[in-house]
Amino acid sequence: QVQETRYGGAANSNSPAVKKARTKDDIKCMTQSEPYCFVGRRVSKYFDGECFFGKITKCDDTKPPPFWHVVYDDGDEEDFSSRDLIKALEHYEKHGKDDTKHLTR
């Protein structure tokens, strides 16, 4: 059974509960203490006035600060700093209802 988590990720109900970030400060704290909890989450960002959606596919915390790799639905990719991640998660909170991939997961 798959459950929806805050910020568009799916959590397996058989796995331990994932903490849900409630505020920007919670997210910022989790980027340091639990950076892998964002892998699999959907994000969004504006490029040239158009909203693009993507998925966080991996986290690299081999040396501080951690970075998150995002693959957009159109095939573009980029790495997010914690600041970028927070912005993209907040953007998805506002615009995720328009994410067609979200409906087909």
Image: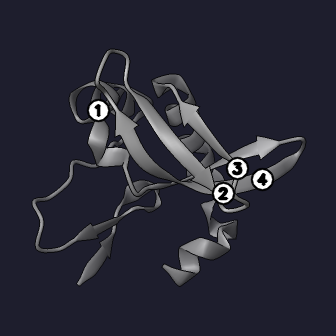
Q: Look at mark 4 in the image and give the residue it sits on.
A: 51
Residue 10 % position (x, y)? 35, 67
Q: Are marks 2 and 1 in contact (CB under 8 Å)?
A: no
- Answer left or right for 91 relative to 23: right
Crowd around label 4: few <14 · some 14–19 · many ≥20 (10 Å)? some
For marks 2 and 1, the one nearer the N-term is 1
Q: CA distance from mark 4 to mark 2?
A: 7 Å
Q: For numbered disc 2, what is the local secondary structure? A: strand
Distance of mark 2 from mark 1, alpha carbons?
22 Å
In contact (CB < 8 Å): disc 1 and disc 4: no
In the figure, is residue 39 to the left or right of 11?
right
Q: Which residue is mark 2?
A: 53
Count of marks, rendered view:
4
Q: Nearer the viewer, residue 75 or 23?
A: 75
Q: Which residue is mark 3?
A: 76
The amino acid type of the residue labelled 3 equals: Asp
Label 3 element class: loop
**Which of the pair 70/49 is nearer the observer?**
70
